[in-house]
Image (cartoon, rainbow, N blue to C red):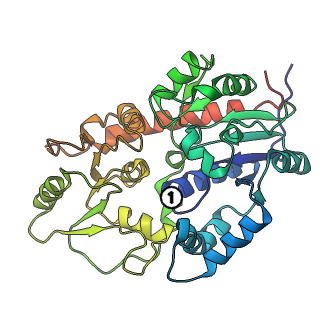
Amino acid sequence: MQKPLKPEQRVGLLTLPLNDNYGGMLQIVALYNVLQREGWEPVLFRSAPRRSLLQRALAALLRSIPAQNVRGLREREMNRRTHAPFLKRYLPETTALLRSSARLSQEVERRRLAAFVVGSDQVWRPDYARYGGNPLTYFLDFVGDEVAKISYAASFGRSQWRDHELTDQVSDLLARFEQVTVREETGKRICDETFGREDAQLVLDPTLLMPAEFYQGMMPAAPSEVAPRVTKYVLDTTPVLEDLETQALARLGPQAVTREILLGKAGHRVTVGEWLRAFHDADFIITDSFHGMAFSILFQKQFAVLINNGRGADRFHSLASQLGLEDRLIPSQGPAHLPKEPIDYGSVNTRLDTRRAASMALLRQGLAHSSPH
């Protein structure tokens, strides 16, 4: 018989490192605040690769020297400074950088955690997870069996598991999870066919668990501009982008303008609030970002998504199919034709409410027990 957790007990969180990925920051902020709303005490664990004292000193020096960006260190430091106030406000309880499994384990014990949640985003894509150290960290290899382990909306980032040298270890680790939930349908299949977790369930990305009003409170004041606006947030330029933009502008009329979200360019670093404001104030959105799509939906915008195969296409198809938005997905190689009919957000919101309730029920179920099955 499993013992229920007490609401005041702490739950650890782990996601990919927070640098300049706006969706990555917002999804963990959403999950953190969902857990708080449910009566939990979340703490975000910050994992980092092990480095020698000399390597760390050299990295600190390079971060401080202007007019250079060796190995991207200076750029990441500037991004860190830009986003630090936001993260401190919305993720108030975090650990120091923990650079080994031993340190991570010690922190779990020190904080007397009852449960640990890994997710969301592409935490189970080993080539991404290595930025935070050992990929097995994201399968909670440092968490003992006295702590309930669950994933929430974890993503493999691809439709196939490619890291076969890790398969046995990952299978053993996932067998110890109280619950496995993933963000894509292909993730369910990988869990079943590769790792023997046929009970994996599909849930919404954490950003979609919170209402639009939660994010509106993060935004700066609205600009005075009133012209109809196409907001363009595209990470990888494709041949059909210009055609889509032309079609979107034509739909908005002769006064319409394009406003592109440019990250780290023209001497200005976009804050999370400014990023959200650009989506909130748009009349039409063109994006190849998964979280760009998510916030287009939350803010009930007309939009088109360019499928970004290199960064992972399954997440777009999985979300679109849940909400009846498959016609908003445009192949990056063309042809580029916007759907004729506008999005019916009455229907979309009904589906979203249903999926949100089901996702929250699974999250509560996963956290309802303090020892694994």
Residue at image location 50% in from the left, 61% down from the top? 215
Indicate left or right for 291 with 53 as reference.
left
- Viewer-nearest residue: 220 or 201: 201
Residue marked by disc 1: 21
- How crowded pointer 1 is (Cα within 10 Å; few <14, some 14-19, many 20+) is rated as few
Q: Tell whether 283 sits left or right of 123.
A: left
Seen from the viewer's position, the closer of residues 101 and 32 is 101
Residue 342, how many percent across, how many down?
20, 46
Residue lying at 55% horizontally and 74% vertically, measured from the top left: 78
Residue at 47% over, 38% down:
353
Q: Camera-side residue: 55 or 288? A: 55
The residue under the point 55% across, 42% down is 127
Q: Name the foreground residue: 80 vs 228.
A: 80
Question: What amino acid type should be assigned to the residue bearing mark 1?
Answer: Asn
Quadrant location of the N terminus in the rendered image: top right
Question: Is 313 situated above or below 94?
Answer: above
Can you see residue 367?
A: no
Residue 292, image x, y percentages: 39, 53
Residue 114 appearing in the image: yes
84, above or below 107, in the image: below
